[in-house]
Amino acid sequence: MEKVRIGVIGAGNIGSTHVRLLTNGECPDFTLTAICDVVVEKAQRLKDAALANLEKRGIKAQDIAVFGDALALMDSGLVDAVTVATPHYFHPVYVIEALKRNLHVLCEKPAGVYTAKVREMNKEAEKHPDVVFAMMFNQRTDCLYRKIKEVLDSKELGEIKRTNWIITNWYRPQRYYDSGSWRATWSGEGGGVLLNQCPHNLDLWQWLCGMPSLVDAHLHYGKWHDIEVEDDVTAYVEYPNGATGVFVTSTSDAPGTNRLEITCDGGKIVCENGKLLLYKNKVLESEFRNNAPSAFSAPEYTVSELETDGYNPQHAGVFRAFSGRILRGEKLVANGVEGINGLMISNAMHLSSWLGRPVTLPIDENLFYEELKKRIASSRRKETFCDEVSDTSSSYGGVK
């Protein structure tokens, strides 16, 4: 195989981004051969845009097939791989269908809405070790986060003691939530800021700092917008080594903040405004505390700005790694089975809020699903996208 024939499932905002990247020259290992959306006219418009992209580059494309049914696309014989860019409930549904057909699959974030279904997806992936399964965690390609990962993995700062992430620059007006009937509903989207905007941050948080063992979260539902899901979150977590953390997010702060601070025994890293600052203690705090020369002394430290390689390919980088894995066995940005981790934290935050108490990880997945179904039943969107309570055997489509 010289090039990977790929189909895009979902012609919404993210699906459109996939099509653009696959046809503008940034992902040369792929040939786009199919697009699917339940609104076939949207898929057709996206096809026209794709052909125009190729024509600008002087490429006469083979025909791009248009489908209104995702399974028909998968069974067409036109694709070696697919991307899944549908509403959240359908992510594991169509990943599983692709895996069963031995099609390589790249799934958009989040991996799903509830971990029980994602666990089913991961078990299916285990049955197909030769099929490449990847997650679109494009923020892992950011040079800032890659540098943080490098420093933390080196252990030059010792063990993590505290993590704090204030990520409130996800501002959305009411008009955003009114743009789709499925958006910001329990039945259509499965959650709010945690399921839509923050999967990248939750993935990065666990990728850098590890999985917490306890979550105590306070969520506000429709506090700032006319929606039924969360738009304001403050969560406290504890880690197996005794470290603690706080995660704060909202879609109503203007101007918002994006500040990640990770404190370790030997200092801390602060990521904000496109810069990385390294505070490095001259003596480990754990050694200093019992040998301090006076009652009010503190470890001396230095401050420096960390340099990065400046490389930040985002979605295109994930696509290139995906094709590199398929064609040459190269390393993925994020293996698909890792998608359950950030979702586990998100589910834990919701469950803690619903129960009004801290929860331990891994969560009780059956309890979470039962609580979610209660909210689906009273959702303002009565047509459900939840695969356990509706028939999704024939198609999807929709926008992301």
Image: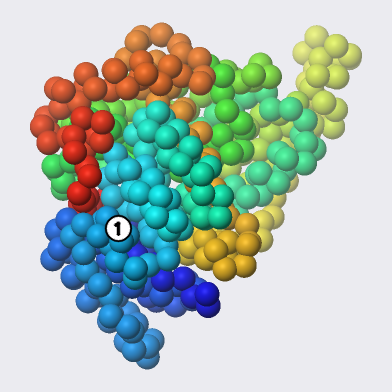
Q: Position of residue 187 (x, y in %)?
A: 20, 32
| Percent x, y of residue 282 | 84, 32
- Whole-percent x and y of residue 186? 22, 30
Image location of residue 90, percent across then percent down? 29, 43
Query: Which residue occupies 69% across, 27% down?
Result: 160
Q: Nearer the viewer, residue 261 or 95?
A: 95
Left or right side of 324 for 235: left
- Mark 1, other Cα within 10 Å: few <14 / some 14–19 / many ≥20: many
**Quick check: 192 above or below 134?**
above
Residue 314 showing in the rendered view: no
Residue 152 visible in this rendered orientation of the protein? yes
Front-lying residue, 90 or 18:
90
Q: Secondary structure at mark 1?
A: strand
Seen at 16% across and 48% down, the residue is 179
Q: Is residue 322 above or below residue 177?
A: below
Residue 286 location, quadrant: top right
Residue at the disc numbered 1? 9
Name the residue: 73% across, 40% down. 153
- At a point 34% along the width and 70% down the height, the residue shown is 78
Quadrant assignment, res 253: top left
Picture quadrant of residue 388: top left
Q: Is residue 25 above or below residue 361?
A: below
How many discs mark residues in the rendered view?
A: 1
Residue type marked 1: Ile
- Indicate the colouring scheme: rainbow
